Image (spheres, helix red, strand yellow):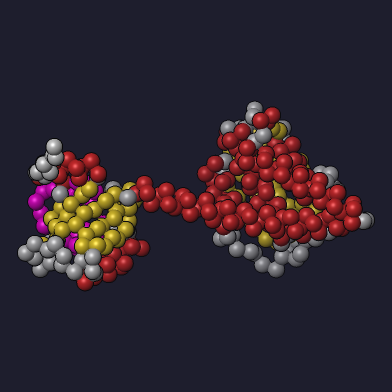
Amino acid sequence: MSIAPPVWHVDHLRIATDAAGVALWAWDVDTDQIALDERAHRLWGITADGSVVTFEALSATIHPEDLDRVKTAFSATREVFGPYETDFRISVNGAVRWVSARGRGDDEGIVGRIMFGVFLDVTERRLAEQAKELIAQEMVHRIKNLFATVAALTQISARSSATTTEMAEDMVKRLLALGNAKELAWSAAPHHREGIDLDKLFAVLLDVYDDKRVIGDRIHVSMPKFIVGDSAMTTLALIVHELATNSLKYGALSAATGTLTVNGATDGKDILIVWTERGGPQVAAARSDNGFGSKLISQGIREYLEGSIGFDWSHDGVIISMRVSQASLAA
């Protein structure tokens, strides 16, 4: 026995569109007036008081970076063949939302002089896409840095070894140490779940970059007694690796005579960490701080350690001053 197809009443359709989060619009192509349903009014932050809504009125809410693109797309909708979709940002009460406007072009489905379509709030989807893109960029950046680090460590091993056998053994030890340091950075190894002393953390992370793998040879670390918490350990370790990699590529650690000194001191509720490079290539001018790695460092210190960072590009070598909150460092 077959079941007769249901009759889709307006109330039934409204239940379905509400469940899907669909907002409705109707556009009079002659007057440029746009009628919005209740959900669309809420989405755009417009009071449903019966006043006339036009595309120009809605444009005041569209993000400035998207406005020209949306205007062009809106003007071309009637010439588009088949379905169209335009994603853009709007700002409502200080909050930025992503909206997807969808309809059919070539006057398909036009009733009289009225065209119909929908708005969808796609904010969560777009934020997820942006997060994935950021992760992909970071992975590419870290892979490039890893290759640069391995190449630089090979040069260090070559300088400190008398034979190829010694070089191979030294290189293996350095790579194993680098792997252990990376593990510490990413997972804060199980035996350190309660935290690790700040001085020891820097020594473990920087040990692999010292020619003789002995902190105090060309890398000197002096930190106050302070236990770094599990959460802050990961952020700080990533920052140290980023700075050390940059030093291997461009700074003091790229030269056999270069030295790195990292000193720390308590300053009220903060800890001041000063990273000083000497004996490397002469610094002709300040390097750009707008690279992806520099942004990661600044973001990590600002957002996760409640601190700040400053760069002094002197001819003798860079001096990097980092101020971090003790409360955040202990977290």
Residue 159 magenta: no
Res 267 quadrant in image: top right
**Viewer-closest of 32 and 176:** 176
Query: Residue, x 87% and y 54% (percent of image)?
Result: 167
Query: Residue, x 76% and y 58% (percent of image)?
Result: 152
Q: Position of residue 285 (x, y in %)?
A: 66, 67
Residue 51 magenta: yes
Res 304 quadrant in image: top right
Q: Position of residue 101 (x, y in %)?
A: 25, 57
Q: Is residue 5 left or right of residue 179?
A: left
Look at the image and tell me whether residue 197 can be seen: yes
The boundaries of the magenta stretch are 39-61
Q: Is residue 141 left or right of residue 162?
A: left
Look at the image and tell me whether residue 46 can be seen: no
Q: Position of residue 199 (x, y in %)?
A: 73, 37
The N terminus, quarter of image: top left
